[in-house]
Amino acid sequence: MPSALDSANLSRQYVKLCDLPDFDDPQFRARLREIVAAGYEPREELRRKFWEYAMLGLYLDEVGALREDAEALAVAAGHEEPLFWLVNRISRVVAIDLYGEGSFAEREADASMLTDPKAYAPYPYREDRLSVKRMNALELAFPDESFDIVFSLSSIEHFGGPKEVERAAREMSRVLRPDGHLIIVTECLLTHHPLDWAPLQYVIRLATLGRRCPKVTPRKRVTDTFTAGEIERFIVRPTGLKLVQPLDTRVSTESFVNLTRWVGPGELHPTTGDRWPHILLKAHGAPWTSAFLALSKPA
């Protein structure tokens, strides 16, 4: 079984940014289609969220984590498809989120998930193996070393400022068993750009009396994104674990074909006018996309 010490045995680069050519891999596409609900056209599959699902499935399979006795914790899980896919392959999945609370309550974290998760299932699943709880990711109510797998997909960047992100990363590592696998997907800026500098955005907020950058602080930018250095500082380092591979921040030119302008939550303007492919976003500074982080806890 590959570990942080023999990661050279992994068949592909997992710790990387979402890239359009990844979807050309038949094995990748097959895993994606296995996890998501049926009925999408091939071009509709070209989205960052589905990339996250496929990468999670491929990685857990390759490292031997999909065992009938394995237990997983999904942090800020909403009602995403991997929950239902996983319970068909391991002993138990616990999904936690602030269900019914916060800005995602009417989208990914509806309160009804607590009482009727079956309503969100894209296919039949082993219902007795899924447990759904309302819980804050900054204070996981589980003993140390409770799970073989802990994962969180594009959520940690929404937990608050750097202190909250660090705290969540520490909590996820704390509840992971030795030889366990921690997967965190977050948003990574491709390059450094002056307009992504939080202190500058804070000055803009003050100068415009809050009309622009209204929620910015000296340490939190407009977009819930990180630079590669911030990922290391605020997420990786607080876990006390090491990435199984160095983070590859390269992105092909193909991924820029339909660069999507982010105006605000839910307001997206793709370059071509077509929703797909949905790989890279951009506000005023550098583009960003999903970054897949895989960490392993030593025995």
Image (cartoon, rainbow, N blue to C red):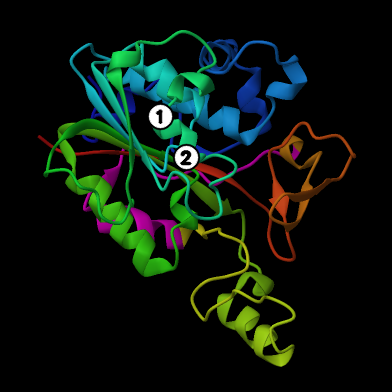
Quarter of the N terminus within the rendering: top left
Q: Identity of the amino acid at label 2? A: Ala
Query: In front: 4, or 61?
Result: 61
Residue 245 in view here = no
Q: In this view, does 1 lie above or below 226?
A: above
Q: Position of residue 272 (x, y in %)?
A: 89, 39
Q: Identity of the amino acid at label 1? A: Thr
Q: Where is residue 75 in the image (x, y as percent from the top left)?
A: 36, 41
* Residue underneath mark 2: 111
* 61 on left or right of 16: left
* 13 on left or right of 66: right
Query: In front: 186, or 14?
Result: 186
SS category of the residue bearing label 2: helix
Quarter of the C terminus within the rendering: top left
* 261 on left or right of 152: right
SS category of the residue bearing label 1: loop
Q: In this view, does 106 lie above or below 234?
A: above
* 132 on left or right of 160: left
Q: How crowded is mark 1: few (under 14 residues within 10 Å), some or many (20 or more)?
A: few
Q: Does the stretch in magenta take in 242? A: yes
Distance between the Cα atoms at labels 1 and 2?
A: 8 Å
Query: In front: 122, or 72?
Result: 122
Q: Position of residue 140 (x, y in %)?
A: 24, 49
* Residue underneath mark 1: 115
At 51% across and 16% down in the image, what residue appears? 35
Residue 214 in view here = yes
Pointer 1 with pointer 2, Cβ within 8 A: yes
At 46% across and 19% down in the image, what residue appears? 118
Chain part drawn in magenta: 230-253
At 46% across and 8% down in the image, what residue appears? 124
